Amino acid sequence: MAESFFSDPFRRLIWSPPIFRQWSGSVALMDWFETPTAHIYKINVPGLGKDDIKVQVEDGNVLQIRAEGAKEESIGKDAVWHIAERGTLKGELVREIGLPENVKVDQIKAMVENGVLTVVVPKDTTPKSSKVRNINVSSKL
């Protein structure tokens, strides 16, 4: 059980170096859920647009998300901050996610809307050859 829990996708989430650097305000959060046809990742990227985010696959099974945060918003010298809870990305965001087996890497799609990056990784639902091979038993070799 523990071996399956700490398989490749989870291992990268738990034992990787700090996955969000220089995040101001709240932590950028990620949801990962699975449907019968795809794995779906939703990541908070407040204030970023499609031109600020780069999504790619490295080493055949590592989904890498990079984003460059916006410059400081100019609000004037005389402004006094009372609360800053919304959080905006300052600096660079780098996230690496080990993809599960049996995904269609060439069909990954990503979109950003309302401060949320959604990455859809379709599953390869074609049946794979069984890893179990039956050996015919006879009375003589």
Image: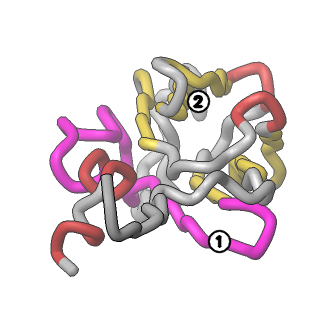
Q: Quadrant of the N terminus?
A: bottom left
Mark 1 closeness class: few <14, some 14–19, many ≥20 residues within 10 Å: few
In the image, residue 92 above or below residue 122: above
What residue is at 58 percent from the left and 54 percent from the top? 44
- Residue at (31, 33) in percent of width and height: 22
Residue in view at x 82 percent, y 39 percent: 109
- Residue depth check, mark 2 versus mark 1: number of the one nearer the observer: 1
Relative to 21, 130 lies left or right: right
Where is residue 106 drawn, in percent x and y? 78, 28
Magenta span dominant secondary structure: loop
**SS at badge 2:** loop
- Residue designated by label 1: 34
Magenta-colored stretch includes residue 65:
no
**Residue 139, position as x, y percentages in the image:** 34, 69
Please report the bounds of the magenta region as a residue range.
13-39
Task: Identify the mark at residue 15; answer none if there is no mark.
Answer: none
**Amino acid, disc 1:** Glu
Whether residue 26 is in magenta: the answer is: yes
Observer-nearest of 11 and 79: 11
Q: Quadrant of residue 53?
A: top right
**Residue 87: horizontal and vertical position, in percent?**
48, 52
- The residue carrying mark 2 is 73
- Where does residue 75 sit, x and y in percent of width and height? 59, 34
Residue kind at label 2, given as amino acid type = Glu
